[in-house]
Image (cartoon, rainbow, N blue to C red):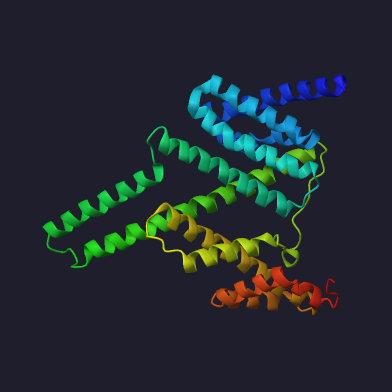
Amino acid sequence: MPTNTTRRLTYGAIMIALFLVLLAVSFYVPVIGILTTFLVPLPLVYYTSKFDRTFSILTAIVAVIVSFLMGGFIVMAFAFPYAAIGVAMGDGLRERKSKLFIFLASGITFMIAVVIEYTISVLVQNFNPIQNILDETEAFYRTNGQLLEKYGVRPENYTELVDQSIQMMHVIIPFVVILTIFLTTWIIMQINFFGMRKLRVKTPKFPRFSEFRLPKSVVWYYLIVLIFTLFVKMDEGTMLFLAIANAMVLLRGLLFLQGLSLIYFYIDRIKQGLWLKVIATILAVPLMQFVTLIGIFDLGFNIRAYITNSPKK
């Protein structure tokens, strides 16, 4: 037991040191830092894939604390999401989860870390980056409107159009942030899994799109959000409204992919060519609501089992 503990501590110290080196290069070295940014979680991914969750979380916490000593709050804010995603990915590898599960778990973990930092920024430092963007955009439009009015070419409904645009940005910006987080997660996962394979750690592969399967809990999340929108009155522009609106867009997007994957599954089942998948994909866009409904039924009632004539009992 002491030997195992010593081994964990030794490996932990080495991985923390490597994490901090990659962090420092990413933060302080131009050009090269852009390349190493996506490798920052690798030491924690490797450590967590080898050792239990408790030691891995403690190692990540120590790494984040030491990053504060190295560069203050700015470096710590940079380190925290990468440490979190490193533990999430490594834990998925250790538990032999599918690549899709690891991707979703890592993306959600990354998003939670960003939300925590955003909340601290607003409450402690009184700095709201999203609101600042909105304020600057609104100020730009107001100034532009005054300039247009000066030359007598401002449309009569200019103020109304500006208000509508700003309101739309309230909804779009959080969604773009979420999309960026998951895209970044995907890039980080691809690069770090390549690194893990070089370290002789087995990594899963994404299944074929026709085998794409979301957790059944996604349907329940969607129903909860849907019921919330139907029975709870929300004022536009509030944090609750923005959270629910973005959750609905994200969940509908996932269920759309689930429905499209079922269509691909059926096409593979009847042994048709790629041409039918192309047509199905093109038609799926204008029929998005119908395809989303197919995705809901697939998760809720396991339609694939009926297609293969082997429903689960």
Examine the rendering and report whether any part of residue 194 can be seen. no
Query: Picture coordinates of residue 202 (x, y %)?
Result: 82, 43
Query: Picture coordinates of residue 59 (x, y %)?
Result: 69, 27
- Outermost residue, front side: 231
Q: Is residue 311 above or below residue 136?
A: below
Query: Picture coordinates of residue 244 (x, y %)?
Result: 49, 59
Q: Residue 162 sits in which quadrant?
A: bottom left
Taking the image as shown, residue 74 lies to the left or right of residue 56, namely left
Taking the image as shown, residue 230 lies to the left or right of residue 220, namely left
Q: Is residue 139 above or below residue 30?
A: below
Taking the image as shown, residue 138 lies to the left or right of residue 92, namely left
Examine the rendering and report whether any part of residue 116 can be seen. yes
Q: Is residue 76 above or below residue 99?
A: above
Q: Residue 311 sits in which quadrant?
A: bottom right
* Quadrant the C terminus occupies: bottom right
Most foreground residue, 270 or 76: 76
Q: Residue at x 40, y 42 (%)?
A: 129
Q: Residue at x 37, y 56 (%)?
A: 237
Most foreground residue, 80 or 300: 300
Q: Residue at x 48, y 65 (%)?
A: 229
How many marks on residues? 0
Q: Is residue 197 above or below residue 259?
A: above
* Quadrant the N terminus occupies: top right
Q: Residue at x 75, y 45 (%)?
A: 92
Taking the image as shown, residue 51 lies to the left or right of residue 116, namely right
Query: Picture coordinates of residue 284 (x, y %)?
Result: 60, 75
Most foreground residue, 296 or 12: 296
